[in-house]
Amino acid sequence: MGYVSKDVPLVIMGGLWQKEYEGPDYGYDEIKGIEKDGDYEFLEFPSKTELKFDAFLDGSMRLYWIGNVAKSGTPLFYACVSVAVLYRGPNKMLKNTSYTRSINLLIFPFKTYEETFPVDFGHYLREFLRKLTGELRAFGQSVYTEEEVRDTIERGRTLESVFGNRNVWIICDTSFSGITAQSGRRLITDRELGRYTEVKNKARARTRHYMRLLEFFALKAFKERNPNSLFMVDGLYPEKRHVQRPFAMSEEDYKEITNGVVGFIKKPMDLPLDDVKEIYEFWERLRPGKALRWRGKLVKESQEEENKLIEAFDFALMRFRHFPGLEITPAGVVKVQAQHELDKEYFRQLLSAVYREKLPYVGTPRRSLNEPYPIEQAEVVAKSFFPSEERIRGLLSRVIPQVPYL
Amino acid sequence: MAGTIRWEELERKLETTKALKDKLEEKGWHGKKARRKFVEWVIKNLKKDPNLWNLENKAIPKLTEKEDDRVEPLKVVVEVIKQEEDFYGLRYSPEEKGEEEKTEEEKIIELEREEEIEGVIGRVAITRETPAEPFSFSFWLKPDKEIYVEPGELVEVSINDKKRQYAIGIVEDAKTTSEKKNIFEHYAGWGLGRAGIESPTEFPIIKHARALLIYRNDGKSSPFTTAHPVYKSKARALEEALSKMIRNEEDRILSGFVRDGTGKLVPVYGSFTNIFGYKSGHVNITGKSGLAGKTSYALFLIASALSYSERMHEKSNFSRTLGIIAFNVKERDLLDVVDIPYANMEEALKNLEDEDPLTAELWSTAYIYGINPIKVFGRAKIYKPGNDFSYGLQDLIEMGEHTITALFDPSDVNEQMEALISDICEEYGDGKTSFEDLIRELGNRLSGATGNFIPISDTSASYHHTATISKFLSRIGKILRSPIIERARPRGNPLDVTELDLSDLWIVDIEPLRDNEQRMVFFSVLSKLQSILMKKKRGEQVTEDGRSLSSFPSRVSIFVDELNKFAPSGRISSSIKQFIKDIAARGRSIGLTLIGAQQFASQIDEEILGNCSTFLIGRSEELETSGRFYRRIPDGLRKRIGYLRQGELVFLHDPLQFPFVINFPKPLHRVMEE
């Protein structure tokens, strides 16, 4: 062993903690695999409407590097995820609701690590996890491993039984993709264990996935109590394929919950146009009261049979805020995502309701063109639920067990 | 039972139910206005939760725990509603949805309603920018539009609910602010100035205020350390706080009212010995003519003081008796006070309820506290110049040479003139010389003069310049063209202030008189009073001429409007100004005090203002309130002076330490005039 001293812990806590990521800044990435179905059309929507949004949802996440694990130096990450649902009453004031939630994640490719160093390290790692969960529980936290989360769902219960608790901690394993069903697709291989960026990106993606689930949890809880409310979510509309199983929902349940839900995408990347020149000309046409509507579909490719339609949405592009001189650029253009097959007139009204949210403008200059004020406020509330860095540092330094491996 | 709720009918019923009226009267809500306010509060809360069962079984027990005065009237409300077969359409059901079944909106409304009943309006905010101090603190208010505070308003801070420890604060300044840092940010937030478009979301606006701590019932003087809940003030706590500031109950004289958070009137007391001597004294009332209500307040204070004096008289506490002499200096301001078309207060209040509910409420509360303006003003004596009082040369000489000097224009009175008047008083104070005799005598001497200096009588040893005597004769000629000066007779019918009885109000009309005549009357009355009160203070019970002083009050107050006329600020010097300054400085020790009123405090001599223990400031322009005199008033409250309503004054009284915005009623004769 040479110069390496005894009692070196398995997890070397980083004295220099660092925040790796905070966001998301501009809504989410586009849905992978969505295709334009049919042609687009320009749609005029009225300047006034009776429809108004009652609630707004936004989520936020922070990812911290907290230490490295022995041998491979694989980074260990901590993430906190928070979502806020704000209610807007008849007095036009936004209020926080009881559906605002936050969870904590500890992320590491446990399985890959265990398989890579099979002799002693599997034992050390299991010991580490056992001690860690024990310490966290001693501090009054509700701790779940992803395996336990999977078991919960497989036994017929839903993610609500996890997210419904206070002080939730989930120990995430990024060795494989998927959290609710083991897909078998490896995310991090033994060769990638030492690649910091790879491991970090996977940790961030996992955190984001949890954020979506937590968002849907809050949305579902709100909509169950307020079925007729109009609800705006920041970013993508909740996709059935992501939420149906974790929340044990039938097709009808999903439709019911997502009825009246609108996704607001601040920075649309996926446009229904292919020709670059056409795109440039197209910006100018997005004048006040005009939107571009199209249908998007998500299909599952299959060799045996015809591609199977999984989901379909109605999309629209509109210029949310107009600044003189920027009419020929995409500045202020946002994407609205709603349930498919909405009545055309209703969809117009819905667009008008979205457009009404242009006032007041938000305070952050770089978001001033494309962020609704209530969404900005929801984000502020969500972030206010993050535990302070000092608190988390203190807690983790006490609960991360000292498991010597030498 | 549920159906359309007949709100208007219910409101009308509650406003006219005698049982509720009686209960409210019993609990301190006097008059129609107070009743209406209470009913509006009930209706507002019922509209938020139209389930009568909740009012009866949730709200009332909760208020009972807090010993809230509204409990008993609320029980009557429940009874009244229950008498109607359909409860006016209100629900009466203990069945409520479970927490889980409630929608978000219902939950939020429920939460707000709970808070509303409990009355919490905000929280003490201890921050780096707004630290709490031993005698001041900041607080924010709930965002509800109907919740606000104004500078001068009183709020209650619950320090420890279980131990019933609380503090009373007076709002010094109130502000609203938002997250927007500046106007541009706000402008940009509104779509770069698209003012015509309505925003679907309101910016969160934070209402916050700074308050001075005026009372803590736990006796501590340390800064708050907790975000204590803040309430609208409650009458009971306010009464306790205000009365503790003047500990001697016998010394309390009603000086106005403040309203508690429920609109109930709470008396504000002044200290008798601090207003009318001997500890300190003098009242100064300032404010814009026609808007501030200076005379109206003076009349209220007069009614309160004389009612107090009468009570003391009944208790044979003669050392606290008072008489007031009011000078009417403009129009019929004070002369009409006796023209009250009601036989008694009961009749007046009954009639006022419909004509002027606010005045009715204020007078009916004042009446409960022992003030009877009909009695006080009904027996006021009015003295008109000429008919009721006049002065001959001998009367003036007896009152002292300064009384004669007061008849001359101050610019005419130099040392030579003063010496001449002094010698005239000495030489002609014989009991028989009239002004005409004097003029004739001096004229003869002048015509027979051989040099520049002549004596004014055969016995006189001092000589005066013929020019001074000529000047005297020339001026006195004009002075004698007066309804109150007896030219031919040595004596007139002077105001005999020795006749002033306990709790008397004399109104001396000097409005028809010229300035010099007004000064003379004012001076003659004050100098006489000064000598009588000095005797009283010494325990002497007879005057020099042997008249009894046993029924003369131990203290006398003089009310004079347009005080600036008699004691202007600046270097202008006159014998009357000097005399008033002297009264202001030393009068309180013998029980002679001034109630002065004027438009601008800045126009009054600073020494006189400095000697006043009580100030009342009505609506005034900012130009005036930016002056030095007003710096003792906190900024926010000072700004409010420009917007005070009629019937509101800022009350500064030495023993109270803090300025209050008080309410007072219109004089009864004014209500009739309107």
Image (cartoon, rainbow, N blue to C red):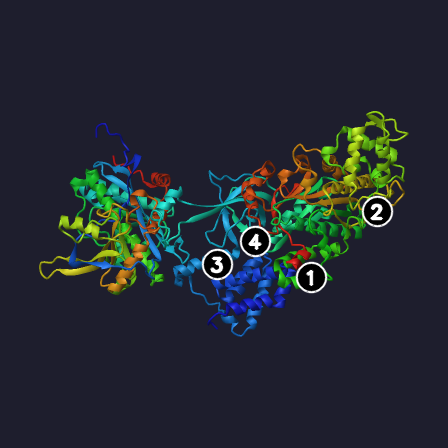
Instruction: Tell us which disc is closer to us: 3 or 2.
Output: 2
Q: Is residue A167 visible?
A: yes
| Pointer 1 residue | B348
| First in sequence: mark 4 vs mark 3 | 3
Q: Secondary structure at mark 3?
A: helix
Residue pointed to by mark 3: B113
Q: Nearer the viewer, mark 1 or mark 3?
A: 1
Mark 1 or mark 2, whichever is nearer to me: 2
Tell which circle, 1 or 2, labels the residue nearer the N-terminal end: 1
Distance from disc 1 to disc 2, alpha carbons, whole Å, reads 37 Å
Reply above or below: B517 against B465. below
Pointer 4 and pointer 2 on the same chain: yes
- Can you say whether B355 is above or below B197 in the image? below
Which tag, 1 or 3, sits closer to the chain's start? 3
Relative depth, front residue between B616 and B386: B386
> Which residue is more in the foreground, A353 or A263?
A353
Q: Are marks 4 and 3 in contact (CB under 8 Å)?
A: no
Amino acid type shown at disc 3 = Arg
| The label number, if any, that marks residue B493 in the structure image | 2
Disc 1 residue type (three-letter):
Ala
- The residue to which callout 4 is attached is B261
